[in-house]
Image (cartoon, rainbow, N blue to C red):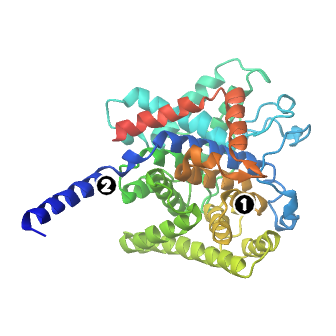
Amino acid sequence: LTMETCKELLLILIIVANVRTTNPSESINLQDKWKGMILFGGYGDALGSSTETANSAYEAHITPLIHRSCGLIIASPGWYNESMYPNTWQIWPPPSNITNAIGIITDDTSQRIAILEDWLNSLYNQHNHTDILKYMNEIEYIQWMEQLKDKLFAEPLYDPRDWYKLRKREMLADWGCMFNEAGYNQAKCNHGGVNKFYIKGAPTCFGIYMYLEIASVLTTRTDDFVYDFFRNITNLDESYGNVVSGLFAVILKKAMSEGAEINFTDWFLKTSQNYLSHRIVISPNETERGNVRKVMDYIQSLSSSGMHAKQLQYSETKALEAYGNIYNGNITPQHSMKPHDPLVMAGIMYYATSYIDDIPSVMRMIMSAPGDTDTSASIFGLMVGAYYGESRLNHMICNNERLQVQLSNIEEFMEQWYDYKLEKGVLLFEELYDYMV
């Protein structure tokens, strides 16, 4: 090769390198990924809702797996205990209205639609010429909740006509009580609100339950920025809880930038291990380092158990029985909020993804295990949906038909009962993303 040829080749390599590294997300269809995140998160919620109560204890877990399915069920009369209605944390339409409906979402999706996205939209409209991130904190969130709660309680609302606003204001009242119990004086426990979940010192999934979708608009920020941002706005999590929140925020953020060239199950574990190893090194103090180690050790333990079940060719029923024994152990604290412990939720995700590669089957395992099945499946669904996007999820197979059928049911239910337009939800994230860039 001549010197001139070498120079030309070097110039070409530099140009190619710049194209590949300037903005990796340029070749990624972010709109498709936001659709996947919204729909697959809702799918996991609706899928797990039918087993959440039944699977809260290990004894219910031994129900043969043949009774579980990756397909959504039709809401027959008495599908859930109508005497519990209104059930604030599910924000469902009145039971008589949804008979024969398919894809019934619960509080996990309702929280995102009715509360989080409403707040994000308010922030964008008020602060689109300033630094929005400055206003994305728990104090601002609480103040917004209080104002909206008071406004809704000032309205004359009646069931069943105003079921959506009624459930929304009751949910806000409960949040006020929990934040107040945690020491936030800006929040008031009034209007009949109840502290349903917060216990001082008990790790609970508040962060990943409330805020996780925000990570989808932070793809241009560093992993450490996203982790620290979520650690700082998830103060209800307690102890190691916000380590899981920070980790899953990083996972979702990175999933939005991935071309999904490898199976999510492999990518999920490897990415988690690599980032937690990094956090152990840079943790600012021994307490934080200990919490990160605890999360990493638990993830590694559950992943190894899942791999062991796979190597021994356990049936799914036997694999779930083995997981049930772990769930009943003392790896995580034994307290009333254990089913909602974010590390418990993470455990079944890493166990299932290490045991089986097929995503619909992983979802089936998550909703067949003991614990808060709909929340676990919904959070897992957000990350998977952001990784694959709607178009690739549509082609996955569930019950011998494309998953597109199930996702269409979710989209139709959200539009019919929540007046939620998928395109409008995507537009909100797109506007926030463009501003962050």
Name the N-terminal-most of marks 1 and 2: 2
Residue 358 percent across, percent down from the top left: 67, 61
Q: Nearer the viewer, residue 23 or 352?
A: 23
**Residue at screen point 74% across, 72% down:** 323
Q: Mark 1 to mark 2: distance in Å?
A: 35 Å
Splitting the image into 4 quarters, where does residue 6 fall?
Answer: bottom left
Residue 234 shown left or right of residue 21 in the figure: right
Quick one: which residue is furthest to the right in this view? 77
Looking at the image, residue 65 sits to the left or right of residue 262; the answer is right
Residue 385 as seen in the image, left or right of residue 259: right
Kindly identify the amino acid type of the residue bearing the numbered disc 1: Ser
Q: Quadrant of the N terminus?
A: bottom left
- Judging by the rendered image, the residue that carries numbered circle 2 is 20
Can see residue 406?
yes
Residue matched to label 1: 361
Give the amino acid type for the residue marked by disc 2 in the picture.
Answer: Arg
- The percent coordinates of residue 188 (x first, y second) are 59, 38
Which picture quadrant has residue 416? top right
